[in-house]
Image: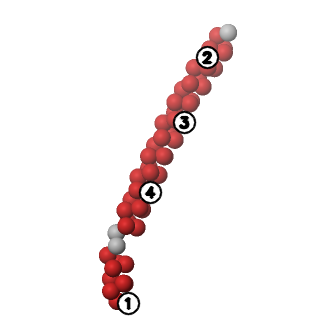
Amino acid sequence: MLAMLVKLLRDEGGATAIEYAMVASLVSVVAFFCISSIGNSVSAHFESVANAL
């Protein structure tokens, strides 16, 4: 029983999964803000074209 507990405490598989999840969430947040910024820029261009017509 003690050997299983020691093995469980030394297992770093969960820590790796958490690190990957943190990196994936950071990438998704950055992508969201970049896409949002590009969307606002495109929207402004379409509005200026619509106003010119």
Q: Amino acid at mark 2?
A: Ser
- Per the image, the residue denoted by label 1 is 1
Disc 3 is placed on an element classified as helix
Q: Amino acid at mark 1?
A: Met
Q: Amino acid at mark 3?
A: Ser
> Is residue 25 positioned above or below 36 on the image?
below
Q: Position of residue 41 (x, y in %)?
A: 54, 26
- Per the image, the residue denoted by label 2 is 48
Instruction: First in sequence, mark 3 or 1: give its number.
Output: 1
Instruction: First in sequence, mark 4 or 2: give its number.
Output: 4
Instruction: First in sequence, mark 4 or 3: give its number.
Output: 4
Gap between marks 3 and 1, in whole Å?
53 Å
- Per the image, the residue denoted by label 3 is 36
Q: Nearer the viewer, residue 27 or 36?
A: 27
Gap between marks 4 and 1, in whole Å?
31 Å
Q: Nearer the viewer, residue 45 or 20?
A: 20
> Is residue 11 positioned above or below 36 on the image?
below
Gap between marks 3 and 2, in whole Å?
18 Å
Q: Residues within 10 Å of mark 2 (few under 14, many from 20)?
A: few
Instruction: First in sequence, mark 1 or 2: give its number.
Output: 1
Frontmost of labels 3 and 1 is: 1
Q: Nearer the viewer, residue 17 or 4?
A: 4
Q: Quadrant of the C terminus?
A: top right
Instruction: First in sequence, mark 3 or 2: give its number.
Output: 3
| Circle on res. 21 | 4
Frontmost of labels 4 and 2 is: 4
Give the image quarter of residue 12: bottom left
Q: Amino acid at mark 4?
A: Ala
Compared across the picture, whether 36 is left or right of 47 comes to left
